[in-house]
Structure formats: C-alpha cells, structure tokens
Amino acid sequence: MQFTGAQIAMMINGRLEGDGNAAVASFGKIEEARSGQLSFLANPKYEEFLYLTNASVIIINDSLELKQPVNATLIRVPDAYSAFATLLSKYQELMTQQLAGIQQPSYIADTASLGEHVFVGAFSYIGDHAVIGNGSKIMQGVVLGNNVQIGQNCMIHAGVKIYHDCVIGNNVTIHAGTVIGSDGFGFAPQADGTFKKVPQIGNVVVEDFVEIGANATIDRATMGSTLIKSGAKLDNLIQIAHNVEVGENTVIAAQSGVSGSTKLGKNVMMGGQSGIAGHLTIADNCKINGQSGVTKSLKEPNSSVTGTPAFDYSNALRSQAIARSLPEMEKRIKELEKMVRQLVEERVNAS
Amino acid sequence: MQFTGAQIAMMINGRLEGDGNAAVASFGKIEEARSGQLSFLANPKYEEFLYLTNASVIIINDSLELKQPVNATLIRVPDAYSAFATLLSKYQELMTQQLAGIQQPSYIADTASLGEHVFVGAFSYIGDHAVIGNGSKIMQGVVLGNNVQIGQNCMIHAGVKIYHDCVIGNNVTIHAGTVIGSDGFGFAPQADGTFKKVPQIGNVVVEDFVEIGANATIDRATMGSTLIKSGAKLDNLIQIAHNVEVGENTVIAAQSGVSGSTKLGKNVMMGGQSGIAGHLTIADNCKINGQSGVTKSLKEPNSSVTGTPAFDYSNALRSQAIARSLPEMEKRIKELEKMVRQLVEERVNAS
Amino acid sequence: MQFTGAQIAMMINGRLEGDGNAAVASFGKIEEARSGQLSFLANPKYEEFLYLTNASVIIINDSLELKQPVNATLIRVPDAYSAFATLLSKYQELMTQQLAGIQQPSYIADTASLGEHVFVGAFSYIGDHAVIGNGSKIMQGVVLGNNVQIGQNCMIHAGVKIYHDCVIGNNVTIHAGTVIGSDGFGFAPQADGTFKKVPQIGNVVVEDFVEIGANATIDRATMGSTLIKSGAKLDNLIQIAHNVEVGENTVIAAQSGVSGSTKLGKNVMMGGQSGIAGHLTIADNCKINGQSGVTKSLKEPNSSVTGTPAFDYSNALRSQAIARSLPEMEKRIKELEKMVRQLVEERVNAS
C-alpha cells in the first residue's frame, strides 16, 4: 500500500514542503531509511541524517530550521514523533481491519458463532458454542475451547490457547503462545505423601482493552473467575495463578508472577521478574520493584516496595547501601572491640 | 448434560430435601448461581445467600439449621465442600472420558499405534512409531515426535510439543503449550570464543500421575533420561534442565527452575520463582522458599531454606530482620565510636 | 538406520577389536545399554559396566587395559568421549539433512519462496513473501508471518511463531514454542490513568549460528531491530525486550530477562533467572550470576557481578557471608554498648 506525501500531510494535518507526489510504502529510521520509505526527525541529535537520508518523505517539527537543502519531501507538524506514532498506529489498525475471512484448513464447530469482519487463520480451532465478536482476528494455529467468548475487535495472535468457558472482552490483544484458562495449581496432600487434584472448575475473564504478552499463562479459578480488569497490560512470560484479580490499568512487566487469590488494585506497577505471594491484597497505585518478592499485603495506596521479602523502598535502598558496607562495618566493630578491651584492661590495671 | 437433584443425591450419598426433579446443567458459586445451576454452602459466612440464591440444587452440611425456608432443592451430606469437589471431579472425568475419535484434519503416521478410546484433536501431529495408550486424550494442535510413548488415560492439552523418543507414563496431565524433550543447554567453549553444541541424545521420562502446567519446558538429557518421577506436580512456566531428576510427589511452583543434573528427592517443595544450581542433591522433604536460589546440596532431609544463596530458614528470617535494622545498627556503631573516642581522649589527657 | 562396528570404526578412525559385523541402531549409556546399542566408556569409574553391559559396540580409550574379556565389539580411539560426541553430532546432522519435502496439510502462501532441500512439517503456515533458505527445516505447527526470512540450514522446531518482517540468519536453531517478533511492551500513560499503546513497528534480526531454547520470547523493536548477534546461545523461557542487542557468542541461561534497549557485549554470560534493567550497556566478557538483578551499566569488560541490585562478585560474597553473621554482629555491638556504658559510668562516678 502506497501513500503520497500529500496524503500523509492530510492525515496528520501537517504542512507540506516539496514534492507532494513522492510516494512511500514503508517506514525506516532516518539513519537507515531507503528511497520509498517514510521517516521522521524528532531528536535534534540526529539532524545530520536529515541531509544524508534516502527517505522519500520525512515528518519534522515545525520549529526545525533547515541548515541545508533536503532532497526528501518534508511534512511539518508541531510534534514529529507524536504525529509519526499516530500515523503508524492508524496504519496498523488499517492493516488489521483488512484481515477478514476464514483461511483453510481451519476447524470451526457448527455450533460456534462468528461476527462480521472476523478473520480465522489456518490451523485454528474454534470449539463448540464459541462466540467471536465483530471485527476480531484469530491468527493461525489458535485453539479456542468450547464456550469461549471473544469480544469485538480483538487480536488473538498465532498459537494462543484458550481453554473452555473463558471470556475475553472487547479490544483485547493476546500475543503468540499465551495460554489462558489452564488448571490452577491446586492439590490436596494425602496421608501417603501423594497429592489429589482439586478440580478447577472456574474460568478466566479478561475485560476490555487488556493486552497480554507472549507465552504468558493465566490459570482458571478453582471456582468463580480469575479476573484481568479493564486496561491492564501484561508482558511476556507472566504467570497469573487461579482466582487472582488484576485491577484496572495495572501494568505487569515480563516474567513476573502473582500467586493464587491475590488481588491487585488499580494502576499497580510490577517490575520484571517480581512475585507476589498468595492471598494478599495490593492497594491502588502501588509500585513493586523488579525481582522483588511481596509476602505481605500492601494496604497503603501508592506504596513502593523492593527486595525479597519486599519492604519500603527508601529504607530498602538505605539498607542495601549499608549491606554493601558490611565488610567495612565489621572492621569498625573489631576496632571498637580492640579499643574497648584496652580501656577495660587499663581500668583493671589501674584499680 | 442434565442431572436431577435425586440423581446427585444418589451420586454423593446425600439426603434429599425438596423437589428431586429439579434439574441442573452447570455449577455456580452460591452468591452468583442462576436457575438451573448446582451450588453448595460450606462456609457459614455465606449462609445469607442460601436464602437469596437462584441455584436450583444446593449441597449443604448435615449440621446446618435453616433459619428461613429455601426455594432450592437441598442435599445434605456430612461435608458439603468435600462432596461438591468429589462430584465435580467425577463430572470432569466423565466429560474427558467421553472424548474419543480422531478430529480432522490431523496427521497420524502410518507407523503410529493408538489404543482404545483415544482422542486426537484437529491439527495434531503423531509421528512415526509413536504409541498412545488406551483412554489417552490428545487435544488440538499437539505435536508428538517420532517414537514418543504416551501411556494410558493421559490428558495432553492443546499445543503441547513432545520431541522424539520421550516417554510419558499413565494418568499424566500436561497443560497447553508445554515443551518436553527440547535440547539441553550444552555448549563447549572453543578457543576462538565461539561455542560448539554438545549433542543432546537422551530423552525425557515422565512417570505416572505427574501433572505439568502450561508453557513449561523440560529438556532432554545429554545422554540417558531427564526424569520426572511418579506423582510429581509441576506448575506453569517451569524450567527443568537436562539430566535433572525430580523425585516422587515433589511439588514445584510456577516459574521455578532446576539446573542440569540436579537430583531432587521425594516430596520436596519449591516455592514460586525459586532456582537450584546444577549438579546438586536435594534430600527428601526439603522446602525451598519462593525466589530462593539454592547453590549447595541440601543433604539433610526436611531442611527449609530461603534467600539467595539460600540458607537455613530460621536464621535467614533473623538475618533479614536485622538487615532491615542495618541503618539503626550503623547509628549505634557511630555512637559507640564517638563515646570510645572520647574515653580514649580523656585517658590520654589524664595520663 | 543400522551401522556395523566396522562402519563406525571407519567413521571415527578407530581400531576395531572383535566382530566388525556387530550392528547397532541406537545409543545407550554403558550402565543401561541393550543389545543392538552403541555405547562408550570414558570415565574409568564406570569400567565395571564394560564387563556387564549388553551394548553390542563400545567405544573405549586407547589407553584402557582390559581386566576381563568383553562380549561387545570394541573400538579404540585416543578420546572415547570426544569420538562418541563427534559421531552423534554427525548422526544427528545426517538425520536432519534427510528431512525434506512438504508434509500435508500445510499452508504455504503463493508468494512465499522456498529453497532446495527445505522441509515444511504438517500444520505449518508460511506467510506472504516469506523466504526459506536452502536446507532449512520447518517442523510441525510453525507459523511464519508475512515477509519472514529464514536463512540456510536452520532448524525451526515445532510450534515456533515468528511475526511478520523478522529475519533469521543461517544455521540458526530455534526450539519449540518460542515466539519471535511479538510487540515490545510500550505503553504511554494517559491523564486518565489508562495506557495508550506505542506502535511497535521494528523487527527482530537473529544472526548466524544462534541457538534459542524452548518457549522463549523475543520482542520486535519499537523502531529498528532487536538484534541477536552471531553465535549467541539463549536457553529456555528467556525474555528479550524490544530494541535489545545481544552480542556475539553471549550465553544466557534459562528464565533470564533483558529489559528494553539494553546492549550486551560479546561473550557475556548471564546465569539462570538473572535480569538486566533497561537502557544499560554490559561490556564484553562480563559475568552475571544466577538470579542477579543488574541495575547499572557494567562498563568494565570481564566484570563479575551478583545480587540484586547486582554488584562486584567478590565483595558481594564477602557481604553475604557477613550478612549471615549479622545476628552475631548485633550481639557484639550489644556487648560493646554494655562495656562502654559501664566505662562511662565509672568515669562519671570517678570524677
């Protein structure tokens, strides 16, 4: 799909300088772009590339004063980066919206129900009574179990597996390889040392505007629902255990895990590789540092914690600094011991 | 599938109160259940919902004394929760047992051998000389390499990949997306800084009654077998390296990892996101706390360890408490230094 | 495929003792091998098994002096282990090279381009304008998005998903379930507490001779490329964020993660479950201990760090040792306080 400089200027409400017929079909960084590509210059540090690049069309800031003539067609806007990002976002939406139809071979149960403008990729499996809302795209090799509901305008990437009875809202994106609705890890210890499985008969509910990364796992509830609330963003390789609730607009970085029945409030942030123990409550707007392990509820909103077990961030930083000075601290104690021993001896001698 | 109150009472050996013909087709929590659903009341805290719920059939404790009339059909048993869990467990078994036949399209090599009552889902691949025992269910999009053996009554969920020559016992459950038999991470450093792959020609053996979570990885042995012994339970996103042995009934929580050639005893427990270094031995019944990193063998059965590097649990807790008081401890040292310095000066002055 | 003792002796340039017609079709450890299997004895500790094993052919060291007669055919070489590993490596290459052709059903876009001796497994999807180089093997259930390029002699294992526009070099191995090119985790916070997705329009470039483990995730760049350089080895369940660069021959053990825009030099080593924060630079040959969390750039080549936040390895070890003696250190301070208090009191009394 090609766009001319003039078309792009109209889309982003920019001011055209140069040949409005210059056409572009893809994007490139200004220092690497080839002829036929669109680029942008936001960071003044890269200005030199403006005069060297082969890009055909470049979005620049209104405020930029050219030091040399430029070959490319320029489009001036108040904020080049923001205009570029908006453009790309629109472009990707457009590309996704154009996906439609059923690739073959795929397997769609007779009792499944597909909305309008739905795409189902090859080798995808749609189980009995599954429902896919208008405009949702199911990429290749996806497995949707019986009774799975997918809302409208979702993007379910290749190889996602969603177990029976799980419910996905509208405008949800799930990246490749993620598993939703696997059994929670529940086993009752028996007298002979073996474990008996506790049936996991709940489901997972993912609300609107959630994005989930690649190869993540979200277990179904023992009963009721594991719940990912509206607007939450989950990164790759995340583990959400049974009966967890993730609050609205909460952000969880890669390789983090939340243990069973823990409830996260709104706008919580978990750094990468962090973990939270089971049956805890994390208040709104709390921040959990990367690799931290939270073992107690955080009842105060806006708390920041770090370490394992996690505790107050500023105290923890101070403790860490001192921890590093432990060897030196031990020397000081030794020195004190020596001096005090001497003082005591002198006193003894004196008496 | 519908059940009447009378049928359920018979199945769980309970005492019926009310309409034995009341029919249910699914389950719900007592505070959410709709008409046509079965529920239970175990926790007295929720008794109010007994009088409000729309559930059609409810399992309750023998000992419960009703404070108001109840619309639903009641079934009384000594322990409502346990009866309910047993019922669900039987129901899920039944549902699984009914799965049978080969969905199309699937790929089953001519030399593969399938037992009776086997199910193979669409888009699954069964390699040359693979063997699937009676009653095992291979869900959609599974890949079984050449010579893979699956025992009886296994449940292999969607998108599991098992590499060639691996052996799975009876009554094993493997959740979606898990990979079994990928190459161990073995590379020999070369003089020029590159690495030469060490061929990984062993396999993985998973014994009976093991359950493995979603998106886990278990590497094949360099030679011989990586071994997951009978009754072990492994959670999601776990990494088991080449030549590891996991003992009977050992339980490993999500996102934990065991490095190459380490042997875990029986009934070991690893908390979430914990790790064990390579070539170690962990005695029976040891407990490894969440996020701990074990760097030395635990030779004493029943040891509990925590931290990185992990050490004795009770000492570690005490050290952690003191670590948090480090800023205060430093103040005490400063104070001591000041006092001692003064004492020393006075002594000098006095002499 | 069968080989005789005489054939194997020729392949590894060894000296035959016994029946050159003894045939083997598989491999086994000397303590477990069955008739018809090839084994080796390198470690003198296992010599007893040489006289007990049922292996049909055994590779042994030139220097070994037999204490008893051996049933098996022997092949003597200077270094039995090395000869055995070489043999296996050749055998595996041979097996892989023999894979060729297109299994059905599979989906190969009309505009895709496949080289010679390519294998595509059943249920694999090759998108528009994708290119697969000579000799590369795409196993079952793989999804290659539009414009994906795979070089020559690659092995892409079952269920790998590679998003559009990513580029894989020559002689690359990617294990089952790994996802390459999923969106980087980029969201701009909005005034109302929600997050707006930052379009991720770059790609992933994996250079030659890289090996990537199972169920790993490598995100595409926001712009430009996430880059895995030549010879790097990445283990299972690893997370590589957007715009990261992994240097040549860098080795990353399982469940480790690298945050956005961080650059790793050459021959860096990351232990299992370690993490690196975003926008850092790690110099060549640095070593990051297992479970460490690196929060600052390591500018000095050959640095070794450990802990969270990670710092100098030898200091850290000393601090850890002292941390364990904290309870005892506190006692010493108490003792000092008592003595000093007494000294001060005496002085007060004396004056």
Image (cartoon, coloured by chain):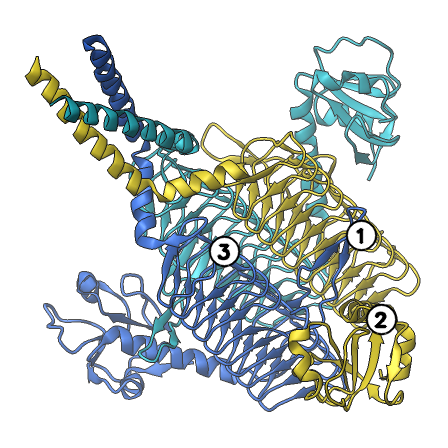
Chain colours: A blue, B yellow, C cyan
Quarter the C terminus of chain C occupies: top left
Alpha carbon distance from label 3 to label 1: 28 Å
> Which chain does the numbered disc 3 sit on?
A
Q: Do tag 1 and tag 2 residues touch (Cβ < 8 Å)? A: no
Tag on residue B99? Answer: 2
Please report the residue visible at 48 percent of the width from the left and 35 percent of the height from the top. Answer: B194
Please state which of residues C71 and B53 is positioned toward the viewer in this rendering. B53
- Under circle 3, the secondary element is strand
> Which chain does the numbered disc 1 sit on?
B
Residue B294 placement (x, y as % from top left): 55, 37
Residue B256, compared with residue A338, is above or below; it is below
Please report the residue visible at 39 percent of the width from the left and 51 percent of the height from the top. Answer: C245
Tag on residue A275? Answer: 3
Q: Do tag 3 and tag 1 residues touch (Cβ < 8 Å)? A: no
Looking at the image, can residue C297 be seen? Answer: no
**Badge 3 density bin: few <14, some 14–19, many ≥20, Cα 10 Å:** many
Residue A231 placement (x, y as % from top left): 45, 76
The amino acid type found where label 3 is placed reads: Gly
Residue B132 placement (x, y as % from top left): 86, 56
Residue B193, compared with residue B56, is above or below; it is above
Residue A136: quadrant of the picture: bottom right
Alpha carbon distance from label 1 to label 2: 20 Å
Left or right: A5, with B285 as reference point: left
Q: Earlier in the sequence, mark 1 or mark 2?
A: 2
Residue C152, compared with residue A54, is above or below; it is above
Please report the residue visible at 39 percent of the width from the left and 53 percent of the height from the top. Answer: A311
Residue B333, compared with residue B104, is above or below; it is above
Please state which of residues C76 and A21 is positioned toward the viewer in this rendering. C76
**Which residue is tagged 1?**
B209
